[in-house]
Image (cartoon, helix red, strand yellow):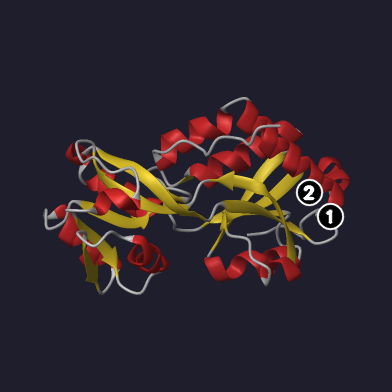
Amino acid sequence: MLMGPASAELKDILEAGTIKIATPENFPPFGALGADGEYVGYDIDVAKMIAEDLGVELELVPVTSKQRIPFLETDRVDLVISTLGANPERAKSIWFSHAYAPFFSGAFAKKDVEVSSIADFAGKKIAVTGGTLEDLAITEDAPERSEIIRFGDNAATIAAYVSGQTDVIVTGNMVALGISNDNPDFDLETKFVIANSPSYIGVKTGNIDLLQWVNVFVLHKKLNGKLNGLSEKWLKTPLPPLPAL
């Protein structure tokens, strides 16, 4: 149960001694109930680091996807750390921090499959869910000798790849992580990235001091390797490298 409204601005959070952060209710490995009844995951650990750096208590507020922006707009939370993607429509309602988590579509295959670009699809069977952005991306540029096999949904695409019907699967990194977790002997690798769609921390419009603090926090944790450590731990993939200054 929430005890009163969120503090919203940075000075108010510091004075209250508590920060309320929306995190995923059931979206592992970003956030979900663990075996001991406590929420665990990438987003949970990021929220804990924020509270620690601020020197305040953390109140986790588990949310569904549809609750994320409304909870922020109505002051039920101070921040949203819940695999939130940024787009122009959402930016009309809230502010976004710098990207803090990798989310991407790519080509994935076992270690011994030599693929580093779409050109290497020649002579190989590629599993993809039909009609997706991944399907459109590879269809346009795939060489003639590649065999793209389209399936009706992610479950069918995964089943085809796992059963050995294809050499490569083109999908999102979280789908690939699920395959790796269920089939550790596959030694699945990211061969190349097709499109990046990272996650951002949501801040209520107008809370400029809090947004600036969060941006410095994200940069600091990237530079000191702590966010990369969390990404390796929970998402089994490194963060994209920082751009050269």
Is label 2 in a helix, a strand or a loop? helix
Please name whichever residue, 83 or 122, is drawn nearer the observer in this view of the structure: 122
Q: Residue at x 30, y 72 (%)?
A: 130
Q: Residue at x 17, y 53 (%)?
A: 123
Q: Residue at x 60, y 68 (%)?
A: 67
Q: Which mark is residue 207?
A: 1
Q: Is residue 22 visible?
A: no
Q: Which residue is mark 2?
A: 211
User: Which three-letter amino acid code belongs to the residue tagged 2?
Assistant: Leu
Is label 1 in a helix, a strand or a loop? loop
Q: Quadrant of residue 187?
A: top left
As drawn, the residue found furthest toward the front would be 144
Above-or-below relation of 149 to 225 = below
User: Which three-letter amino acid code belongs to the residue tagged 1?
Assistant: Asn
Above-or-below relation of 80 to 219 = below
Q: Count neighbours of disc 2 (C-alpha within 10 A) and say few if under 14, some if 14 to 19, many if 20 or more.
A: many
Percent across and percent down for residue 24 are: 52, 56
Judge from the rendering whether residue 20 lies leftward or rightward of residue 175; answer left or right: right
Please name whichever residue, 115 or 13, is drawn nearer the observer in this view of the structure: 115
Quarter of the picture containing the C terminus is: top right
Q: Estimate the spatial distance between the alpha carbons at disc 2 and disc 1, rounded to whole Å.
A: 6 Å
Percent across and percent down for residue 142 are: 31, 60
Q: Quadrant of residue 6?
A: bottom right
Q: Residue at x 57, y 29 (%)?
A: 226
Judge from the rendering whether residue 245 lies leftward or rightward of residue 140; answer left or right: right
Q: Count neighbours of disc 1 (C-alpha within 10 A) and say few if under 14, some if 14 to 19, many if 20 or more.
A: some
Percent across and percent down for residue 175 are: 34, 55
Quarter of the picture containing the N terminus is: bottom right
Q: Is residue 168 visible?
A: yes
Please name whichever residue, 94 or 152, is drawn nearer the observer in this view of the structure: 152
CB under 8 Å between discs 2 and 1: yes
